[in-house]
Amino acid sequence: MILSAAAVFPVLPFSLSLEEGAPAPRVGTMSGDQPCEDKDQGNLSGVQHIVLVLSGKGGVGKSTISTELALALRHSGKKVGILDVDLCGPSIPRMLNMQDKDVHQCDSGWVPVFVDQEKSISLMSIGFLLEKPDDAVVWRGPKKNALIKQFVNDVAWGELDFLIVDTPPGTSDEHISTVDALRPFQPLGAILVTTPQAVSIGDVRRELTFCKKTGLRVIGIIENMSGFVCPHCSECTNIFSSGGGEELARHAEVPFLGCVPLDPQLSQSLEQGRDFMQEFPKSAAYPAINDIAQRILEQAERQRS
């Protein structure tokens, strides 16, 4: 049975339509035996660590980093959730080959989409709520902010080691709403993603200022698209310059988590929704992503101790 928008989103003072007269989103009910957490305890009560992925600029690979970190943490034995709050550009469902899935509802709220049978990675995105994949989300700030708060409060994540929050570019309404909604749950912090060139570095400096003003701890900076390693001769060509992310981290006195090179195998796996960390362990990007995941695990362990 498909629920009406009013039934699915009772806390919103409007229907969840993409524009006036649009159809209701695709949300179904779940059978009564679906295991869910007790909503009275909070749907994030079972989440150990919350990590936000930020950047002041679009196109630097935040969704790529979010997806691959989730896969790397899963292969380290962790249970991971991904919350995609990039409402206008939800790309993670495709990157994980989950774009045709529906969101269901149980007594505790919305059940996230599970990427594998073991339910080691779960995902929530507005991409699952669109009637058609090409639908544009034409919303003003208040409507976006209300949905972000509902994503934070009403998704029944269950027990997770990590919740990775993929954000849109910038430092605007969505980011403030996300940080404010997550603040009671004491996030581990934010990962800032940049590319090596100066224009991207400048935008990430603004993101550092945003983190400082909102009291959000910076876990570290990742330099993405850092050189292209030829798959034939292994020579590295710095297409977008190099070293900018590391220099920014040094100047801002925050950890530098590492460089992720351009890798055709990584691009291919994202296009096809495959598990890059499992299928391409000998690729150039694999050790970089794995090392970054291990640094995040080390920081999480230090926080717990």
Image: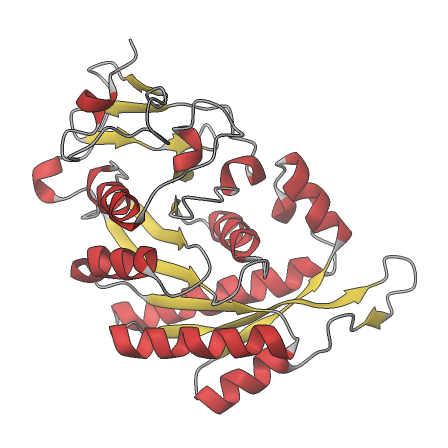
* Residue 99 vertical placement versus 259 (above, below): above
Describe residue 59's horizontal placement relative to residue 83 as left or right. Answer: right
47 and 228: which is toward the camera: 228
* Residue 140 vertical placement versus 56 (above, below): above
- Res 280 visible: no
Coordinates of residue 96 in the picture (x, y in percent): 55, 37
269 and 238: which is toward the camera: 238
Q: Residue at x 51, y 89 (%)?
A: 250
263 and 2: which is toward the camera: 2
Q: Quadrant of the C terminus?
A: bottom left
Q: Quadrant of residue 37?
A: top left
Q: Residue furthest right?
A: 233
Coordinates of residue 211 in the picture (x, y in percent): 33, 74
Q: Residue at x 14, y 44 (%)?
A: 42
Q: Residue furthest left?
A: 40
Q: Residue at x 26, y 16 (%)?
A: 29
Coordinates of residue 130 in the picture (x, y in percent): 42, 28
Q: Residue furthest front?
A: 20
Q: Quadrant of the N terminus?
A: top left
Coordinates of residue 67 in the picture (x, y in percent): 52, 49
